[in-house]
Amino acid sequence: MRDNADVRDGTGEEHTSRPEPAARQRSTRWLAARRTSLRRWCALGTLLWRAGRWRTAGLAALILLKGLLPTGIVLATGLLAAALPDAIRDGLESPAGRQALLALSLVVAGFTAGSVVGAFADYAARALDDRYALAVHEAVVNATVRTRTIEALEDPSVAGEIAALEEVERADGHLTTAQNLRGVLEYRIGGVAAAVVVFTFAWWAPFVLLTGWVVLTSGFVRWVEKGAELGAKLGATRMRRSRYVRNLAVEPAAAKEIRVFGLADWLVGRYADTWTATMREIWQGRRHASGRIIVSVGVLVAALGLVFGWLGWSVVYAGLSPALVVVYAQAILNTSGFGVLGDIQWATGRALVASSQVLDLERRLAPRPSPKPPPPSRKPAPAATATVNGRPPRRPIGIRFDGVRFGYRGRPQPVLDGLDLTVPPGQSLAIVGENGAGKTTLIKLLCGLYEPTAGRILLDDGGDPEAARQRIGAIFQEFVRYELSLRHNVAFGNLALTADDAALEAVLRDAGGSDLLAELRSGWGTVLSRGYDGGQDLSGGQWQKVALARALAAVRGGAGLLILDEPTAALDVRAETELFDRFLELTRDVTTILVSHRLASVRHADRIVVIAGGRVAEDGTHAQLMADDGAYARMFTLQASRFAVAGTAGEAADA
């Protein structure tokens, strides 16, 4: 709504619109807050239900019983107080004596039941907490790993939400959510039951008390939620930045450069400044909300004073019995179940915010339906079902880019602009070009990590693209160095080979890493990280051999397209050329795509394309492109001259 804006009605006359009344604005904000609160409670209930239906239902029943027991004990105490004077006078054999014994038994039974039910509820809550933590972790992991593309994960707002959830996990690991919720609900149920008892004293009294407690609680909850919201908001930027700086200081990845360049003082100061600036904003937000708490306490004191004053007046002027005074006084005090509950309420409020974020993340990252593949130009080959020598038969994948256009968010110019490219099944293709030409972007689009903004990418003559991508193996320049065993680092290319030592040894040998097993203390079981007992780290060249073995494992598992996106950048030219040549020999029956900035390493590919200006600028064999004397020939000649000079210098040094 526009405030104080000049608008014209249908007659053409000007009128000044009035600002929305303050009362309506407050009402709108109140309704929005209630909707947000309801959504968060529904989210928490949904995750608990996922964690265990029967466990959640059983815990709910125990919470209800435990919450009602204090009021039952209050009523039994009143019954005892009413019967006790006559029982003392007439003896325990009298009706009053039997009533006193019954009331005493009820009081004892109530306290005993409270202890027993509390123990069962505590056990049930702890058991549910373990499952709840797992449900939260599974929801977040499934949301992030099942996205069709990685573009959503690069969204700063998504990264911020994930960072905020990490902060909550660091606080308690979601392992006390059910226990804290149990405490909050028990107090709240007890407050409701006590309010019902107070209603029998004076119909207006519970509403007055409820107003006092609700005002205090809402002020406290707003204070809690303000901190949680600021933490979630700042977790997207500043808190994540401070955590990054801290990790630089304490983790081994940057340890060498920190010491060589003398960055220790800078890191400590930067971490302290970033963290303090973040917390200062959170503290300021909490201070702004603290005024409400002061006002709320005053409202509560007035409400309690009014009700207890009326209780005293009833004793003096209305002849209220001592037994009822005992009951009503305890019930009035027990309405504190509506009040502020301290740490468990703080933790529950944080869990409510986190659970809502988890489900929002699920909805936001839910995989969209795959685009319907266009009609194939011919019937695609049937999926492979038989095996050859115990392996799935290799069926190379054909590729076609039709007018593909793609640009990254925040960049004015597209990286690929109308690119057309066809790769027949079984061909070895090398993609070259200057830095930033779009080589890696093309590969990511081919793997389905991004979706083109225009054009289409066809695999297997337009068959199911998702099925085809299940048969793609790729190793990128920044390949993952899993802090897991050598076995898993290789077998991740084809999980079916995890327990097949012979197959794993074969692919490792083909990748040139047969000497690795002899160097690792625990063989295939060695964790490839020094941060674990018995773990060992590898050199850059050894890691690349492991990554290439992973790719060969994918080929052994039936991959029809293998992509190498500059994974050998740490090797010298001769080693890279020898490795690519061996790789082309080992993968002759699959489609291969090699990306490298070293043209000498890919000259034996069946075909070479040069990417420039977002399109294919040159296309042909090495000999054809050299004969054309275009961009490829110039780049090749320039690199060859550099390597020749380097080689001559090296020979002179050796002499």
Image (cartoon, rainbow, N blue to C red):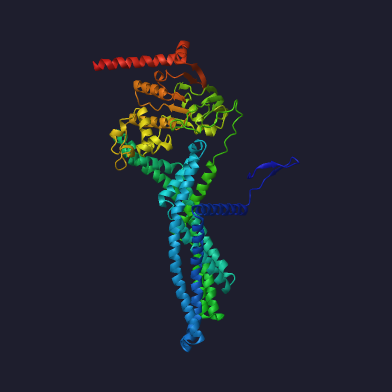
* Quadrant in the rendering for residue 489: top left
Q: Residue furthest front?
A: 389
Inspect this view and state whether residue 235 appears.
no
Q: Residue at x 39, y 29 (%)?
A: 548
Q: Against 327, is 337 above or below? A: above
Inspect this view and state whether residue 193 appears.
yes
* Quadrant in the rendering for residue 655: top left
Left or right, 342 with respect to 253, comes to right
Q: Against 258, is 296 above or below? A: below
Q: Residue furthest bottom?
A: 90
Tell me residue 117's x, y (percent): 46, 66
Q: Against 634, is 293 above or below? A: below
Q: Residue furthest right?
A: 11
> Closest to the observer: 13 or 58?
58
Tell me residue 192's x, y (percent): 54, 66
Tell me residue 235's x, y (percent): 45, 44
> Closest to the observer: 577 or 634?
577
Q: Residue at x 74, y 40 (%)?
A: 12
Q: Residue furthest left?
A: 655
Tell me residue 357's x, y (percent): 50, 47
Q: What quarter of the picture does the N terminus occupy?
A: top right
